[in-house]
Image: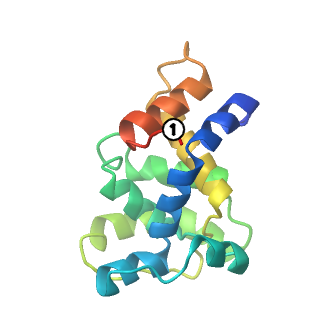
Amino acid sequence: VNKRLLNEQVIKTLCYFERDLKSLFVIYMNENYWAIKKLDRILLTEREIDLQNKKMTAVSFVRFLRESEIVPHLINIEHIEDCLSRVIPGTVPKENDFYYKHFLSDVYSKEMDKNSEVKHEGDPGMLFFEFEITIARIAWEVYKDSDKKAPETIVGSFIDNVLHLRVN
């Protein structure tokens, strides 16, 4: 599946939506998300995130999926955990525990409704390119019954119809 999603046409499709995907990435960065909620402004610009090599936490990513109504309507949280562990595998024991102890499932079911920050030191986080690849992987999982369609069509349809982003 990953080989099919990493072909030139899928990458080109992701590039078409890059500006809006980057805006989502910036907004859902943990620091920016809570600053918007509390101060009505972002703390880190796209450039600062790049320079500081900041990562979006997996919890922030799940928050984005929940607010986009992807979870639980199109895909469940356990499936998201599986997708994340395939795209961003744990490299140290704490990151492996993060996935194998189902921290995201627990946070999703217990903490997500509360308006508070949730942190886990084993959260592997994701850079922007990993965010894009994870979106592509989720698109594939949601529309995997559409095997006759090209992967770039599936990813483009998902971003357009589910995330409601338009080609830049």
Name the spot of residue 138 as percent of width and height, x first: 51, 42
Query: In percent of the image, x 32 and y 81: which residue is there?
Result: 40
Identify the amino acid type marked 1: Val
Query: In percent of the image, x 53 and y 46: which residue is there?
Result: 135
Q: Residue furthest front?
A: 168
Q: Say if 56 sits above or below 82 in the image.
A: below
**The one of 90 and 118 positioned closer to us in this rendering:** 118
In the picture, measured across the screen, residue 137 lies left or right of residue 112, that is right
Name the spot of residue 120 as percent of width and height, x first: 51, 80
SS class of the residue under badge 1?
Answer: loop
Query: In percent of the image, x 55 and y 16: which residue is there?
Result: 149
**The one of 72 and 37 positioned closer to us in this rendering:** 37
Q: Can the viewer see residue 1?
A: no
Q: Say if 108 sits above or below 142 in the image.
A: below
Name the spot of residue 37 as percent of width and height, x first: 31, 79
Q: Say if 33 sits above or below 16 in the image.
A: below
